[in-house]
Amino acid sequence: MEELVYLNGVLVARGEARISPFDRGILYGYGLFETMRSYGGRVFRLDRHLARLMRSAEKLSLAAALDPVELEQAIYKTLEANKLPDARIRLTISAGEGKRELAPPTSGTLTIMVVAEKLVLPPPQAYEEGLRAAIVSARRNSQSPLSRIKSISYLNNLLAHSEAIAAGADEAILLNERGFVAECSTSNIFLVVEGRLLTPSEESGILPGVTREVVVELAHGLGIAAAVGEIPSANLLSAEEAFLTNSVIEVMPITEVDGKPIGLGKPGEVTKRLMAAYRELAERETK
């Protein structure tokens, strides 16, 4: 059966899904998205994903035309129609068709799309051995309002990822314009330095990830000292452990940066504890 896509209130076959060439999302990258994961047919922390989306929508003058309840219904309708209990889900909101001008949209007619695909995860070996990361030349602008919004204007992330792959790494690490650690191309980053868990603050120019938030909460519950703040790039190589987080791959160890090992060059104990705690929480909340 061909995949079904939710588009503006209707489920359509993937091959028949169409949006206007004058959609402001296409013309200007004016829109937002959220990537989520379902476990057994339930989306983990869906409320937090939608809350983040609505906060961003307020900043883009799109919130008045959005209803979180309807968005939740659209997501579950798409999952059920595609018979996918375990899925990668993307909700995309764009400003819709409008005049070709730079003023904020006023029509209130948005493009709303939900795509649910079969969940494909990295191989178990990746979790057991960790990923290789590279610091790339692309930077996050901590002063830009876009740094805290999951915008469909994603080219900076794509270029960063491509640079890392060309360097023989699996993932990119972006610094901000002041040289502090920001985030990875599709994820947030954590370090363990002198036994303490560290992750960059929002003021560093990061997207505040839903999984990042959960991991900080889990760390506190496990008695792991955790702090949020500015992290000098030198800490990347002096750290005992490092890992990245996002809603699809959960917690993934990083064991190498720029060809040099992190700690012992294998996933550390703090990382392993948080990996296990996250999986247990996700399974428990989605039963």
Image (cartoon, grey):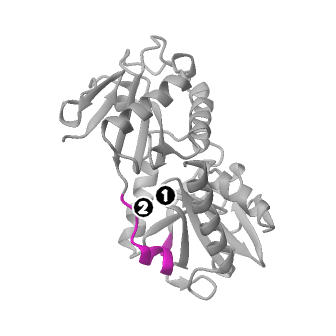
For label 1, the SS is: loop
Q: Is residue 185 above or below residue 114?
A: below
The location of residue 245, given as percent across then percent down, is 57, 60
Highlighted range, magenta: 120-134
Q: Quadrant of residue 3?
A: top left
Q: Residues within 10 Å of mark 1 (few under 14, many from 20)?
A: many
| 140 and 16: which is toward the camera | 16
Residue 130 shows in this picture? no
Which residue is rendered at x = 63% and y = 48% of the image?
208
The location of residue 38, given as percent across then percent down, is 46, 47
Which residue is rendered at x = 61% and y = 42% of the image?
148
| 132 and 78: which is toward the camera | 78
Q: Residues within 10 Å of mark 2 (few under 14, many from 20)?
A: many
Which residue is rendered at x = 43% and y = 34% of the image?
76
Q: Is residue 38 above or below residue 279?
A: above
Amino acid type at mark 1:
Ser
In this rendering, position of residue 228 left or right of residue 241: right
Residue 222 shows in this picture? yes
Q: Which mark is residue 125?
A: none
Q: Which residue is mark 1?
A: 185
| Sequence-first disc among 1 and 2 | 2
| 67 and 237: which is toward the camera | 67
| 261 and 7: which is toward the camera | 7
Amino acid type at mark 2:
His
Which residue is rendered at x = 35% and y = 46% of the image?
84
Q: Is residue 269 magenta?
A: no
The location of residue 268, given as percent across then percent down, is 63, 80
In this rendering, position of residue 194 left or right of residue 286: right
Pointers 1 and 2 in contact (CB under 8 A)? yes
Q: Is residue 67 above or below residue 271?
A: above
For label 2, the SS is: helix
Q: Which residue is mark 2?
A: 161
